[in-house]
Image (tube, rainbow, N blue to C red):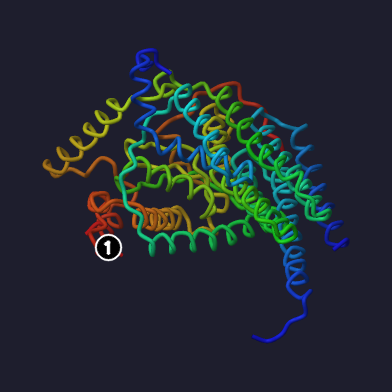
Amino acid sequence: MAPDSRPGLRGRARRVAAQWPTVLLLGVLWMLLWGDIALGTFLAGVLLGLVVVAVLPLPSVGVRGAVRPWPLAVLVWRFVADLVLASFQVAWTALRPGPQPRGGVVAVPLRPAPDVLFVMTAELSSLVPGSLVVESDSAAAVLYLHVLDLAGSGGPDGVRRQTRALEERVLRAFGSAQALETAGLGPRGAAS
Amino acid sequence: MIVVVVVATALVAAAAVLALVRLERGPSMLDRTVAFDVLTTTIVGAVAVEAAWSRRTESIPILVVLSLVGFIGSVTIARFAAREPEEERRIRTREEVEAADAAREAAREAARAAGRPVPPIVSAEPENDDEERS
Amino acid sequence: MTHVEPGFWTTLADVGAAVFLLLGAFLTFSAGVGVLRFSHLLARMHAVTKPQVLGLILLLIGVALRLRSWTAVTLLGLVVVFQLLTSPVAAHMVGRAGFRTGKVAPEDLEVDDLSPDRPPSPPERLPREE
């Protein structure tokens, strides 16, 4: 951490106050870890959460967006289906006899979007469409994905198409109206 | 149930042995990290199979802890292995992030005004891109 | 509602648990095979991110079906969430470190869009294993 971003006591208190959702979340997590739904446990968790947020500061990522239930359901459903499919594909690739397929690193240009959604797309894309994020450039919105079986994924263009489709599902599920506008997706299903 | 448990244990144990072989062979530290991650998961898997067999819940917290240990190990080693540029190692402040966003947006606007291709889009497949944006 | 045997649901849950346990163990095994058999670092990491994560999730579903207690299910759910959140991040960190330090040999890649944009710093390249 850079020394200049180390805040004073007052700045620290302000930051903790600004990150109250994180503290509440940590409290709930603590309650789940104890497996004990009780007010005392929750308060202890909130107390610990305050300490964590105060001592180990993280930059605020600025989550501004919407949650749309139907696109979210589509995203989750496709994610689970793709995860099962991709897992068994990799398992088969590992187990089958003979030479292994040739892989490659493909640059996938994504739509300009807020960092949170970019990260979410990156995380999901390393789990689902048979790819793995090697390098990401959030300023230029480019992901560099390694693909295990390039021919089986439809070549570099196939990989780009799949990843952009995944990104579109993420944006539709979580992006604010403005984010969708910036990404060129229009208000309601204008593109593809 | 006993047959299932025996088969599952055998598969998980075999995976652990394979991961151990990779752990020994390397060749690089990162390969060992990957193998160690698999090994951790096989331990989680073995504890899970045991819990399913005995139907006792005492070992579940072990699973929670182990599932995080593997992650912390991988990230720590990866962080040490990669010699990152000093500039990227730092956590950016909110002002810097906003400045970078503004600069990116300005560059895109300037490019659009000049009729040049918009920077964030890599020139890999411009036709496809235009089609999806319209 | 038709009458079912009192033990019907527990038997059904046990059978489901058995199926999930076997599938999960199989996927974990294939992750082990993949990590040993794939020829270079990036390919090996595919084995760690996909079959392993799903294998673990299936194993844990099997456990949850056997235990049938809410406390256990919430904890197991937490493990699944942690796995889904951490595994891609860990894989990305390792892959990036590997690429930047040149542990990925160009001959392993059919296509390489990254090296022209951001060439890896050439370090001591270890001999590649067959």
Residue B69 is situated, as x and y percent measured from the top left of the image, at 66, 34
A188 to C34, vertically: above or below: below
| Quadrant (top left, top right, bottom left, bottom right) of the N terminus of chain B | bottom right
**Position of A191 compared to A16: left or right?**
left
Callout 1: few (<14), some (14-19), or many (20+) C-alpha neighbours within 10 Å?
Answer: few
**Residue nearest the viewer, comparing B103 with A149:** B103
Residue tagged by mark 1? A191
**Position of B112 compared to A122: left or right?**
left
Instruction: Please tell me in which quadrant of the rendered image residue B108 appears.
Output: top left
| Quadrant (top left, top right, bottom left, bottom right) of the C terminus of chain B | bottom left
B129 to A191, vertically: above or below: above
Amino acid bearing label 1: Ala
Instruction: Please tell me in which quadrant of the rendered image residue A21 appears.
Output: top left
Check the residue under mark 1 and report the chain it is in: A
Residue C52 is situated, as x and y percent measured from the top left of the image, at 66, 49
Q: What secondary structure is marked by label 1? A: loop
Q: Which residue is located at x 27 percent, y 56 percent? A: B127
Residue B25 is situated, as x and y percent measured from the top left of the image, at 76, 33
